[in-house]
Image (cartoon, helix red, strand yellow):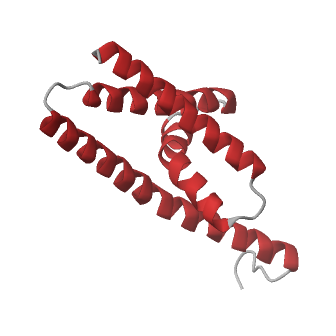
Amino acid sequence: MSAKKSIMIGVISGVFIATITVLCAMLNKDNEILRGTINFIASVPTFLLSSWLDLPQIFQNILFFAYWAIIGGLLGLLLSRKKSFIKTICVIIAVVFLVIAHRVVQVPLETQLRDALRGLGALFTGKAHLGAP
């Protein structure tokens, strides 16, 4: 398979992953496992686009799909290598790096979100202490 074809298949796969993630997020009704998977897939692009690039939400949404298209294209490029041993090692390293990066970003984001929701809940229930005691 040619490198261009592998890259194109990777780009299409990346966009497919992003589309499935968005659809699952829209259809999720309190399924903890599905929510964790969605958070895992969306954590790095969301973190990069919202904190590093202060862009309007529509551009962040577009760049979310571009992120996964680029990741898919890079994996497709790695898979187009001629030697299967090098190809396998490169893909394993890339996947491990992605998993670690997503997990490292996901944990602090979930902690911050949980703390913010806890504080908001305390504010609405009247258990929050505003200001000095």
> Does 46 sit left or right of 126 as displayed?
left
**Residue 23 locus on image (x, y percent):** 70, 42
Q: Quadrant of residue 80?
A: top left
Residue at left offset 29%, top offset 25%: 77
Height in image: 76 above or below 43? above
Q: Quadrant of residue 88?
A: top left
Height in image: 39 above or below 126? above
Front residue of 107 and 53? 107
Residue at left offset 17%, top offset 35%: 84
Height in image: 39 above or below 42? below
Residue at left offset 63%, top offset 35%: 19
Q: Quadrant of the N terminus?
A: top left
Front residue of 44 and 130? 44
> Does 70 sit left or right of 31 as displayed?
left
Q: Quadrant of the C terminus?
A: bottom right
Front residue of 113 and 69? 69
Task: Count all numbered tags in the image, as a single digit.
Answer: 0
